[in-house]
Image (cartoon, coloured by chain):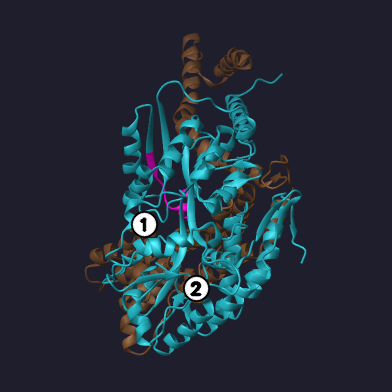
Chain colours: A brown, B cyan
Amino acid sequence: MSAGMETRPETAAATRATAPGRGRDGGGDATRRKGASSGAVKRAPWVLLFPFLALFLLTFIVPILMALVSSFTKVTRGGLFGEAGVVTEFAGFDNYAQVIGDPNFVASIGRMFLFGIVQVPVMLILCTVLALLLESASAKWPGVFRAAYFLPYGVPGVIATILWSFLYVPGLSPIIDVAEVFGVSPDFLGANTVLWSIANIVTWSYTGYNMLIIIAQLKSIPVELYEAAKVDGASALRVATSIQLPLIRPALLLTAVFSIIGTLQLFAEAQVLQRVAPAIDSQYTPNLSAYTTAFAYNDYNVAAAQSVLIALVAFTLSIVFLTITNRKSA
Amino acid sequence: MSPLSRRQLLSLGLGASAAAVLAGCATPGTTSVNTLPTIPPAAGKVRLEYWAWLKGLDQVTDLYNKSQDRVQVETVFIPGGNAGGYQKLYSALAAGAGPDIAQVELRSLPEFLLANGVVDLKRYGAEKYEELYDPTLWNQVSYTGGIYAVPQDSGPMGMFYQPAVFDQVGAAVPATWDEWAAVGAELKGAGVLMDSFPLADASPFAAYATQAGASWFTAEEDGWVIDMTDEATLKVAAFFDKAIDDGIVTTAYGAYTPAWFSAAADGKIASVATGSWGDALIEGVSGAEGKWKVAPLPTWDSGYASSFLGGSTAAILANSQHPQEALEFAVWMTTTPEGVNALIEFCGIGWSPAVDVVGTLREKPSAFFSGQNYNQEVFVPATKESSQNQDWSWWPVTQQSFNILSDGFRGKASGGTLVDAVAQAEKDIISVMQAKGLSIRKASA
């Protein structure tokens, strides 16, 4: 605190000393006024930023730091229930080793890779096609359809999963009933199919949202380009492939990165579907795994290590994806 | 000395406060409330909070609140057990808060004990209530010389079945599991399932193994002794391996899932071996009135007449300021006829934990179950001390163990066996226990 009081006059003096150099007319009163106002100007951003910074630190930076510290901590309990002593100590990379050595956790990340490799391209192709169709000259009622495609995004993931689960559960699902008429009995919740049932829910939820991002980019394409293409006699398909697709590249990259991160963070859909799908275990997705470890097994330290690893994988994937796409464009 | 800029000052201040926050947040649950002095009863009025997933519990606490004016109990609804309730309780405990009383399943109590989350009630004189409770359940709340909760409800097992479906193949009600398998094989021919076997939930399997005489964990002087590959467990595992392979039971869904209700209503599933609390759920099957009856659980060639499936306790949590009052309320609720009747009427608990109080509603025949007085006929004998495995004890990583087991069981769908899953689970559970620092060894054969 005393340091703060000492610095104030010094800073003021420093401001005063530099002021004449900057001010041409150099009057004493003017310099003092300038000094005072420049102090206020310097203070203003911090005052205005304070609410943001405080919340950002408390809800973002500090939890991340705590998770990092926690992931390097180990608690061992001796005896039957820890009655022989509880020791908290620095664990080094023990927790990380335990997480990487857990085949179920590694499998959950692998599962998300598989999910992402299939679901993200399917969704991006779908949303690009929808956006191009809605933005084409011959589109009828584009406003209505845009709203209709976007609507699923307004349904929270948990509710969306409950809705879809009624279409997946045998005995309740009209889809299965109709399929059985044709002699097929699809199992949407089986060990090999449930991942794609989740992918379907995610695609249904987010295609409209990604479509909107792409439409926004399409709308920013200058009209002159379309006119030039028209003059050159380009077909609608040619306009799409030669003008629209190259120009919505940034929007596609953005949605791809969001989708990669979103895939690794898959949680609500899997957790809700767990109630009706025995194939979904407690470590089906990486986030579900961290959640289970923290709040069902009460092992906050290992859960912290899992969370840090998930963040690292998401970070690495995004960087790799951006590097590859940038190299191609260069 | 160069002057400190505002930015540096700000970062210093924030850094210092972040360090303080970090220092204050040690890993939760590392200090034990049971080493601190006991809290004497309060002189004035006391307000208790009770978190549970029993519906209508507020009507039970209202009765208590009206019966005296010193202690007022308020209820807060939490999701059931591991579906979100424990997550709430653990995070409240980690934050140094939480209710005075919480509903904790018998099997999860040791996990709360490991997290230093529950009060040793022996320090508040709980041993004098021992004789009021079912001895099997009392065993399951007593660990290392302490008493860590009061049993709240339980579920002695029986077999609910549809007589008309059995009649289709002219089968009698099976008394042993071998007869059960024979009836199942006949039903299979008629396109009907005998029961379901949930791969995703290991608790029915554990209950069957308990019935057969297994005792997976024993607390010894030198630590835990694990024995999951004993004769009884392997016999049960092999039995259900065969039942699944023969198509007698389905693994596609567990009991009381939407798919199960649909199959039960269509008469496609003949019976369900379950806890006494299954009666309320079966009453939810559409058009089921008069179609179901209850028989004792089939028996193994060794072991016991029945087993408990599910059951919970009222545990006093570590941050309670009024453990004495909380204990008195919990004992009132679970042992007085007034409390037990209210728990049955308003909350529909599976079975009373009190040894002498079954509950008025359970003394009469049931119209829904074709006038059968099933509670007296089936479940009262099933709770007798001699009908239950007294050696069974829960352990501090039950939830994780059950998840490990069910993860292994899921392998059944892709060619694995329950027998292998149990053997692998035993190894995995040992390493989980060791990673926590707990002493554990394999029982010598």
Secondary structure type for disc 2: loop
In depth, the one of A216 and B313 nearer the eye is B313
Q: Specify the quadrant that holds the N terminus of chain B.
A: top right
| Horizontal relation, residue B198 to residue A104: left or right | left
Q: Position of residue A7 (x, y in %)?
A: 61, 16
Query: Which stretch appears magenta?
Result: B75-85
Q: Chain of mark 1?
A: A
Q: Position of residue B393 (x, y in %)?
A: 61, 55
| Horizontal relation, residue B115 to residue A143: left or right | right
On the question of residue A328 being in view, the answer is no
Q: Which mark is residue B298?
A: 2
Q: Chain of mark 2?
A: B
Instruction: Say which amino acid is labelled 1.
Output: Pro
Magenta span contains residue B404? no
Snapshot quadrant of residue B285 = bottom left
Secondary structure type for disc 1: loop
Q: Residue at x 54, y 57 (%)?
A: B385
Q: Which mark is residue A156?
A: 1
* Residue B79, placed above or below residue B243: above
Instruction: Say which amino acid is labelled 2.
Output: Pro
